[in-house]
Image (spheres, rainbow, N blue to C red):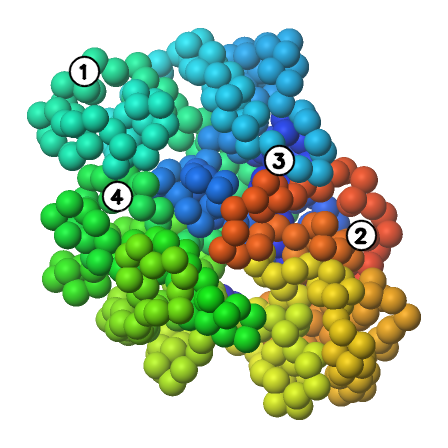
Amino acid sequence: MEQKRICGILMPISSLPSEEGIGTLGKDAFAFLDFLFETHQSIWQVLPLNPTNYGDSPYQSCSSNALNYYFIDLESLAEEKLLTKKEIKEADLKGDPRRVDYGKQFYHKIALLKKAFSRFPRTKEFHDFVERGEYADFALFMALKEKFGHRAWIEWDEPYKTYNEETVAAFEREEEEEILFWHFTQFIFLKQWHAVQNYAHARGIRIMGDIPLYLAYDSVEMWKYGNKVFRVDEHRTPAAVAGCPPDAFSDDGQLWGNPVYDWEGMKKDNFSWWNARIKDNLKLFDILRIDHFRGFDRYYAIPYGAKNARIGEWVDGPKEALFADKLDYNIVAEDLGVIDDGVRRLMKFVGYPGMKIMEFAFDGSPDNEHKPALCTENFVAYTGTHDNMPLRGYIDGLKDWERENFIRDLLSQGEKLGVKVYTSSSAAMTRSVIRLAYASRANTVLIPMWDLLTMGEEARINLPSTVSPANWSRRFTRRDFSNSVKKFLKTLAIRSKRVYNIDK
């Protein structure tokens, strides 16, 4: 990333306003880019674009490279005469403007996309897209999921449960249209995505993507490639699963349950699968944030079948070997969690910007590395991430003595950075923390939309290690992008000298 003082907003696509029950790549995506342009923001950070799986998490996907068809804009398909406005209205996707109803998306949006596909002209461009086969694994896997009632591959009937070329070839002949439909979802997504991306670049805005470290067990990679990618036995039973050990925030740790990678096996072909994955993502995004970067140094492996993450071991990852030829890539490393000397060595080697989280900063400790006055240039400063409680909600939940520490630290940091801070309310303190982040030396500042709006606990995007309709479903309305919010953000960018856009 360029060594410039820049700023931007973290806003999941799913959270954009729309009439379709979920954020899409339609007019509200373009309107959000206009909002960023008007307020001198030069980065839009999104969450992973992969299709969601069990629990609706973009970090538990059935495919490492497929794209979330829920984000396809139906109004744009109506403009192409593939759907009618009446059909979209009758599908009743709208729902709660503050929450995504993933059930409606699953039952009604896919049906509308299939209707659009039935009217879609099979152009040479589409034929060539299918022939390239970039999404062939995903299309096959989803067609098989349809056949077996969307159950996990481990519950499919034989011989389909075990990948077999002869069985697959016969299925592809029988279900050609169903497989082509899933190719169509990727074709349309990319068409709409590139339009958004081009509009962003015309506004001098870059899009930062997010790549999960792990995949779901119920993924095409596990079904098709098994032990070529993961640490599994001949029955594809994981040797271990991923998570985090117990810490001050969790007595049981975090049990994510994702299968862990066979790094030793991958090393034999110079990590070709990971190389391709990173390069594919950098075709979609200008900057790539890699989630749980510490897992490339060492990862926490929990015995398969464990009920929590109390028992586990740290196992070596690929370390510098994976990144030796990627030092000039536009990558941000999510270097949070249990950080030790090995992670520090890896971060020094790659030179990627790390992350500082302001929500962690105001604890009374003068040496807390997340404090805005201690933040140095090669970092991205955030008020919080998608896994954090919204900053105002965090402040609301502080005990009296913790709140006193917070206020004392806030005032001290304001003095050090020459920023006027306000402590009359949790919302005022939230805005003060944002001002401090902007005033820090960090080259890049990214503020989650929910913190910019000083929203509380109700706006939380995700509570880690839980499955809930509240996770990954928060949405914003058009009224949230008010003139007062624009004025606050624009003033911040100007005063902190972060007005910078890439060449148009």
Structural distance between the alpha carbons of marks 2 and 3: 25 Å
Residue lying furthest right: 424
Q: Is residue 421 or residue 472 the one in the foreground?
A: 472
In the rendered image, which residue does mark 1 sit on? 173
Amino acid under disc 3 = Val
Q: Is residue 245 or residue 112 the one in the foreground?
A: 245
In the rendered image, which residue does mark 2 sit on? 486
Q: Report if residue 465 is visible in the image.
A: yes
In the rendered image, which residue does mark 4 sit on? 221
Q: Which residue lies at the image location 62% right of the left edge and 54% below the top edge? A: 10
Q: Earlier in the sequence, mark 1 or mark 4?
A: 1
In the depicted structure, whether residue 170 falls above or below residue 140: above
Q: Are marks 2 and 4 in contact (CB under 8 Å)?
A: no
Q: Earlier in the sequence, mark 1 or mark 2?
A: 1
Q: Earlier in the sequence, mark 2 or mark 4?
A: 4
In the rendered image, which residue does mark 3 sit on? 100
Q: Earlier in the sequence, mark 2 or mark 3?
A: 3
Q: Are marks 3 and 4 in contact (CB under 8 Å)?
A: no
Structural distance between the alpha carbons of marks 1 and 2: 54 Å
